[in-house]
Amino acid sequence: MTRPARAWDDRRMTETYDVHADTAPDGLDARLVVDRGAFRLDVALAVAPGEVVALLGPNGAGKTTALRALAGLTPLTGGRLRLDGAELDRTPPESRPVGVVFQDYLLFPHLTALDNVAFGPRCQGATKAEARAQAAEWLDRLGLKDHAGAKPRKLSGGQAQRVALARALATRPRLLLLDEPLAALDARTRLEVRAQLRRHLAEFEAVAVLVTHDPLDAMVLADRLVVVEHGRVVQEGTPSDIARRPRTDYIAQLVGLNLYRGEAEGHTVRLDAGPAVTTTEELSGPVFVAFPPSAVTLHRERPTGSSARNLWRCEVAGLETHGDQIRADLAGGLALAADLTTVAAAELDLHPGAEVWATVKATQTHAYPV
Amino acid sequence: MTSTDRTGAATDTLRGGPRRRRVRTGVPLPLLVPALIGLAFLIVPLIALLVRTPWHSLPEQLTSPDVWQALRLSLICATLATAVSLVIGVPLAWLLARVEFPGRGLVRALVTLPLVLPPVVGGVALLMALGRNGIVGQWLDSWFGITLPFTTTGVVIAEAFVAMPFLVISVEGTLRAADPRYEEAATTLGASRFTAFRRVTLPLIAPGIAAGAVLAWARALGEFGATITFAGNFPGRTQTMPLAVYLALQSDPEAAIALSLVLLAVSIAVLAGLRDRWMSAG
Amino acid sequence: MTRTARRNRRMSQVSGVGAAALLALSGCSSSGSDSSVSASDSASGKISGDVTVFAAASLKESFTALGKQFEKEHPGTKVTFSFGGSDSLAASITGGAPADVFASASPRTMKIVTDAGDASGAPATFVRNELEIATLPGNPDKIGSLADLTESGLKVVLCDKEVPCGAAAQKALDASRLKLTPVSYEQDVKAALTKVELKEADAAVVYKTDVRAAGDKVEGVEFPESADAVNDYPIALLKDTQNAEAAKAFIALVRSAEGQKVLTEAGFLKP
């Protein structure tokens, strides 16, 4: 059990798409297999036009390799790659209808913003004047009219990001790829750019795939998440689905939940880790049980007359400030993370090594089949 | 992450913060002394040349048409050799920096070989390759009637042979330092690899190319051994300044010094001009 | 004032500039010549020690043989040669290079040394060298005379007029009123010969000795005009010699019947 981050603020409980692109002729239908020494990427990806999919995963999971394979910058060792019904496996990158927004944008430093955007149309055969006119239009659309003549080093991070997006869109791609589109921005700019990017992606009519390790970016920007770990897809679904029902420690940590695996029998789940958890759901067979750290209540003495059915004796392994709250890492009866207020932590006299009792109400837990 | 920041801040406070950092700007003596010796080592011979220049006979020496003929030929040949080096050297540097192929390390070593080869040996090697009886030259002669030794073209070839490695090394270094992902970005925008090279890579590495070209030009201008061996020595056709200087040295050292001075002055003027225009930008 | 003293004064000027590294370098070389002084001092009457001979490049084969012979005849001696263009060697000697004997390929270059006061006694002519035309093996262009070289289409190389073989060739051409435009004026006689050996040039005007030394890689063609441009080779003892006895003995060997035999076998003419 890894330590969960701040509980996921599930802001995006939007409608659930359920697109099966493999039945539709349009869109992306790919199985990307890339062997690189000991590492093997094997990811299946089906995305409909107009849909935005985020590849989410830790560093080294193979997300960027997948993106490069889609762009044609890394050759596939196996699988298939079909876009709008056309095979792209052997197509060189310059002939693919694919646009890429790179992590650090890679705007050509010797060209102005306008010429950066005009580069694509120019390569596609437009005259210099046509390409520039198209570029000007794209810059205008992205609110960069005043910066057309600026060299990349004169642009702010947010502006550079939009120029990079305009440059990718100016080739009229059928597949738009974004590699960590917000990673290079500071926290303030990020908020603003994330909102703008979401709007632009919503307007984009073809397939968009973005790669990120930031769950917030993924959940705000994408309609559907594909979680990749060690080169494999470990979970796929809408942001709300993933936020509520994580299936790996990595995702649980991302969305800020305590997650356990166990065997359910009625309302009781016997955890693989040892103790049992009482839940409201009635299930049988292998299940996941999840609950947020804020659902955990701590006591210095064994509580008497508590309504909580789930009670474990634990020891404080570590304490950490988390905004205006204290995050306590507990070991012992059950390894878990608990959030409590600073006042409560002081009253309980918590310190590493202290013995505490942890309770979680059954109604706060969520069990779902594996 | 937060803990590292905190330690960083703590050390700053201990050292007295950024205010303290400004104090020590002096050059450390163990660097300054060898640096000045190094400077003297390079400059003193040039000063000696100036000190021993026969200033009284200089005007007479320099008005000789032979001097201007040799200087003109030197400048033309060095410039052409640099141009040749650019046309074939930059793509070679790109190949070495960007394309993985078996034996790349060996090829790189071969490219730099003319740097360690005594120029006279280089000249003999060129004769054996491109001479009238050379392994390539005999075909040039019998098919096209082209012979390269004893011609101005031969001078350009000899100079390019010796000077090109400087350009290739310089450009390859710049290419390796340049981010290859710019080329990738260009290909995702529909550029072929050649277009990406021409429109993105080339402008990006322009300062490195300029520096390499200046280096190659300077080397070509001073070239002696390979030139006299491959192209021979004939006034107006293959006698460049260094050849004229060497032969003048045999009988009239004063004339040799005067010629050297002209070569030196012209080189300084050109290099200083180029440096201001190209190299300060990069 | 001796040359050593002059050099020392220059060195102290350099050290005054503060180039410590340069001083250290020149210090090394002067200690090398000191050791040869002590070697000659210990010998009284009997010949021993080192002899340094600066000799024209064309003398390389015959002088190397004579050096070996000398060392054999006088055990305990060592003859060191520096072969090169006569002009460069003369410049080195007037510039202070440590040498005991100078054998030059032309009286003009020997004059540079004697004018500078660096020779001890008058130079003596020990051999003469005659010009010859070097052609490709088998003489495919059927060159039979100096005048044949002026034929168009023939690639001829001459030595530069600044070096002895070039001056001699020019003299021969002028004497026979021929006008010859070569493809190149080479910097020395070996370079001129190399061009023919590599078949880059069809012919070169070089010394008889060089043709002989090149073996069957070139073919020699004698021409009568060469008599107008015979080159005298002078040899002289140098003033700053550290081993005058041994140096004199070497010069004597060169001028002896034995020495002349070796030299004439190499193609030189007796003086």
Image: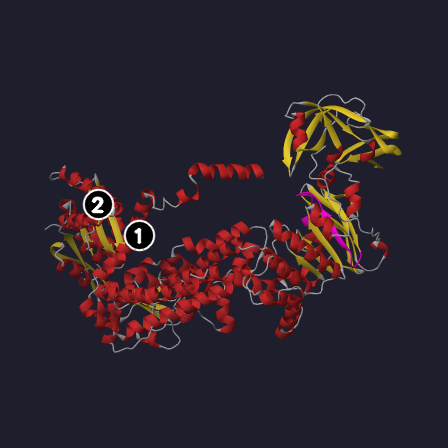
Picture quarter containing residue A204?
bottom right
Pointer 2 chain:
C
Please tell me if label 2 and label 1 are on a single chain. no
Picture quarter containing residue A58?
top right
Q: Confirm whether residue B254 shows in the render.
A: yes
Which label is found at residue C70?
A: 2
Q: Where is residue B94 in the image (x, y as percent from the top left)?
A: 54, 58
Q: Position of residue A33 (x, y in %)?
A: 74, 48
Contact between marks 2 and 1 (CB within 8 A): the answer is no
Q: Where is residue A171 in the image (x, y as percent from the top left)?
A: 68, 65
Quick one: C174 or C131, which is closer to the camera?
C174
Residue A233 shown left or right of residue C166 in the figure? right
At label 2, the amino acid type is Phe
At 78% from the left edge and 35% from the top edge, which residue is drawn?
Answer: A290
Q: What element carries label 1?
A: helix
C230 in the magenta segment? no
A62 in the magenta segment? yes
At label 1, the amino acid type is Leu
The image quadrant where one finds the C terminus of chain C is bottom left
Quick one: A227 or A95, which is closer to the camera?
A227
Give the colour scheme shown.
Answer: secondary structure
Is residue B78 positioned above or below B32 on the image?
below
Residue A140 shown left or right of residue C125 in the figure? right
Give the magenta range.
A48-64
Which label is found at residue B39?
A: 1
Callout in the foreground (2, 1) = 1
Quick one: A48 or A318, which is closer to the camera?
A318
Tell how many labels.
2
Residue A52 shown left or right of residue B46 in the figure? right
